[in-house]
Image (spheres, rainbow, N blue to C red):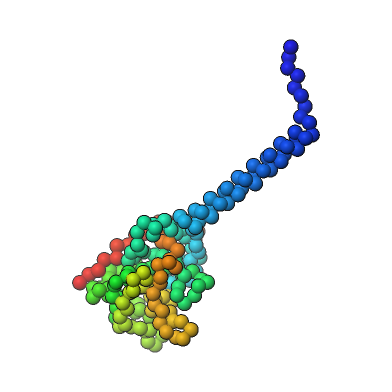
């Protein structure tokens, strides 16, 4: 005899609906948790604000940073990093690491010297002095020497004439606070994601020192 298909009762239909809704909620929670875990531990998006990293990065571009690399090794000279500066715990900055722990960094007449050797900086914007703003009559901390402490980093913008960075940060008592703590570094910039016509990998830089 042919099988007779029974119609689902109202209780069964309700159970099916609730089971479907429960699956949707559980799957949504799992996706959200995975998203935040990835963002917290692996990768995260940030937007570039300002011109301090021209011509490497431009105002308004969206970038992807990698966090996982610094679990495996220390930040290196030449890395472009997103971090919270010592002068503010609210805003994120993006700059290039110039000095690592133990380095002696000297700024002199528009040049950067690390451990008494001049750095090769083909990425800097124009040939300008290490001033905060081009129209300033004098350069802040020109010819100053910085000894980078353990666990901290000295950073500069590629657009040296238009960057607030290790040369200019001060606390409420106007004392210099030039170094970024490793724990405040969010990650290394790896990719420009938006605008679409500007998608590109951010070039790796071997920050060589010359005699």
Any part of residue 103 in sight: yes
Identify whether 189 is placed above or below 137: above
Residue at screen point 34% across, 59% down: 73
Residue 189 or residue 53, whichever sits in front: 189
What is the quadrant of residue 111 in the picture?
A: bottom left
Residue 27 or residue 136, whichever sits in front: 27
Count how many numbered circles sit on residues in the image: 0
Residue 139 locus on image (x, y percent) = 37, 84
Identify whether 154 is placed above or below 61: below
Residue 151 locus on image (x, y percent) = 36, 69
Residue at screen point 53% across, 50% down: 34
In this view, which residue lies farthest toward the left?
211
Residue 143 or residue 159, whichever sits in front: 143
Residue at screen point 29% across, 72% down: 103
The quadrant the N terminus occupies is: top right
In this view, which residue lies farthest toward the bottom?
137
The quadrant the C terminus occupies is: bottom left
Residue at screen point 73% across, 17% down: 3
Report the side of 72 relative to 17 (left or right).
Answer: left
Report the side of 49 relative to 4 (left or right).
Answer: left
Residue 175 or residue 124, whichever sits in front: 175
Report the side of 23 relative to 8 (left or right).
Answer: left
Residue 21 locus on image (x, y percent) = 68, 43
Residue 144 locus on image (x, y percent) = 31, 82
Any part of residue 192 in sight: no
In this view, which residue lies farthest toward the top?
1
Identify whether 193 is placed above or below 30: below
């Amino acid at each position: 005899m042919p099988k007779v298909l029974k119609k689902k009762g109202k209780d069964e239909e309700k159970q099916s609906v609730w089971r479907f809704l429960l699956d949707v909620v559980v799957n949504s929670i799992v996706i959200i948790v995975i998203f935040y875990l990835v963002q917290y531990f692996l990768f995260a998006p940030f937007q570039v604000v300002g011109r301090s990293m021209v011509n490497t990065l431009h105002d308004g571009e969206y970038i992807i940073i990698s966090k996982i690399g610094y679990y495996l090794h220390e930040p290196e000279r030449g890395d472009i990093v997103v971090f919270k500066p010592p002068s503010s715990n609210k805003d994120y900055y993006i700059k290039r690491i110039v000095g690592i722990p133990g380095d002696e960094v000297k700024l002199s007449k528009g040049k950067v010297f690390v451990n008494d050797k001049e750095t090769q900086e083909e990425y800097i914007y124009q040939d300008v002095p290490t001033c905060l703003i081009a129209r300033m009559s004098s350069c802040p901390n020109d010819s100053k020497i910085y000894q980078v402490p353990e666990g901290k980093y000295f950073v500069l913008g590629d657009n040296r004439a238009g960057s607030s960075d290790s040369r200019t940060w001060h606390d409420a008592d106007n004392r210099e606070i030039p170094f970024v703590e490793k724990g405040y570094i969010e990650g290394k910039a790896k990719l420009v994601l938006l605008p679409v016509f500007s998608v590109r990998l951010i070039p790796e830089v071997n920050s060589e020192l010359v005699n």
